[in-house]
Amino acid sequence: MTTTPRELFDRHVRLIEAGDLEGLLGQYHEDAVLLRFDRVVRGKDALREHYGAYLAARPHFKELLQVADTEDLVSYQAVIEQGDEEHRAYGAIWTRGERIARHVSGLFPVAAGGAARKGVVHVDLEPYTAWPSRSVPDPRNAGREAIGPVLLEIVDAEGPILAERAYRLYVKASGGKALTSIARAPLSGATFRLKAAGAIEMEEGSEVLRPAGTAEVRVRELGQRALDEVPLREVAELMRRLRAAGAVELPRAVLDAYGLVRMTAKAEDFLAQAEQVSEMADV
C-alpha cells in the first residue's frame, strides 16, 4: 500500500520523538533539501549533521495544532518542547514517491508557554493558511489566462494578503529571485482584471487583496509571513483586542502574540503605524 504524505509525517513525528536518526534520514531522498529560515540543508550528509544536533536536544511534539495534506504535500503547525523552552513550529513537506524531496521548516519561540514572560496577554488568533507553492509559468511571458488563476489561488489561500506578498509568492514559484518591474506589470494587470471580474476585492487606499465576499480583516497567526507582510489593519485589530484584554505596551504585546522576540527599528516603525490606525478606529 502506498504511504500518504500524512502517514509519512506521522512517522516523521514518531521518529523524532524516538530520537531515531537513521530512521529519520531514511525518509529523505539522497538529493533532498531542508530549507530553514536561517539556512539551507542539502543532501544526506548535511541532513545527518543537522538532525544529529537537533535530536540531541530531545525535541518533543507537545501539540499538533494543524496538519493538512494533498497527494504530494503535507503542511503542519505544532508546539515543540526542547528542554525548558517551547517553540511554535511551521513547516511543509513535499514528497516524491514515498520519501521527502523538499522540506521547509521554521521555529518561533512561544511567548506564552511554560517560560512565559510576566504580564504577557493572550488573545486567540486564527491559524494562517499558507499557499502551497507549486511550479507556475514565468509572469513575464505567460498570458493572462495562465497568471490570473494562480493569483486567485494565492488570494483564496492567504487573503487578505498584501499584493506585494502575492506577487512575490508567484515570482518565487516561477523560479524567479526578485520581483522586478517587468514581472510586476503583468501580475498587477491580472489583479485588476480579477477585481473587474468580481473574483477578488481590493481594500480602498491600499493593495490588500481578498476573495470577493470575505471579511476585510482576519486576525491570524503570523505563519510564514514577515511582520511587515501582515496587512496593517490586521495588526491594528490585533492591537485593539490586546488592549481590550489588558495589554499596555501594544507593540511588545503584538510581538508576543506572534511569537517574535526582537524589536528591530523596522518593526518598531511598522507597529507605530499600526497603533495609529488602531487608535483612529477607536475614535
Image (cartoon, rainbow, N blue to C red):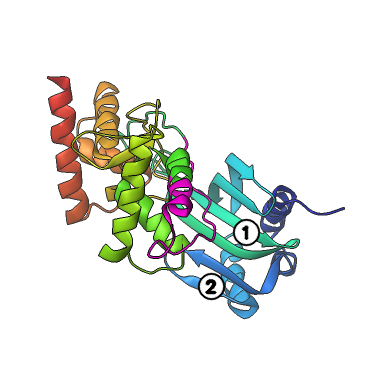
Question: Which of the 4 image quarters holds residue 200?
Answer: top left
Please report whichever mark, 2 or 1, sits nearer to the chain's N-terminal start: 2
Q: Position of residue 3 (x, y in %)?
A: 79, 54
How would you rate the neighbour count of disc 2 (Cα within 10 Å): few for under 14, some for 14-19, many for 20 or more? Answer: some
Q: Examine the structure image and report whether residue 8 is included in the region drawn in magenta.
A: no
Q: Is residue 237 above or below residue 145?
A: above
Gap between marks 2 and 1 measured at Cα: 15 Å
Q: Position of residue 141 (x, y in %)?
A: 41, 65
Q: Amino acid at mark 1?
A: Trp
**What residue do we see at 53% from left, 60% from top?**
104
Question: Which of the 4 image quarters holds residue 24?
Answer: bottom right
Q: Is residue 29 above or below residue 57?
A: below
Q: Examine the structure image and report whether residue 148 is included in the region drawn in magenta.
A: yes
How would you rate the neighbour count of disc 1 (Cα within 10 Å): few for under 14, some for 14-19, many for 20 or more? Answer: many
**What residue do we see at 24% from left, 33% from top?**
236
Q: Residue furthest right?
A: 1
Viewport quadrant of the C terminus: top left
Q: Amino acid at mark 2?
A: Val
Q: Mark number for residue 41?
A: 2
User: Of tags 2 and 1, which is closer to the observer?
Assistant: 1
Q: Is residue 180 visible?
A: no
Camera-side residue of 257 and 102: 102
As helix, strand or loop, the secondary structure at mark 1 comes to strand
Do tag 2 and tag 1 residues touch (Cβ < 8 Å)?
Answer: no
Q: Is residue 256 visible?
A: yes
Instruction: Write the start and end of the magenta stretch as one range.
Output: 127-151
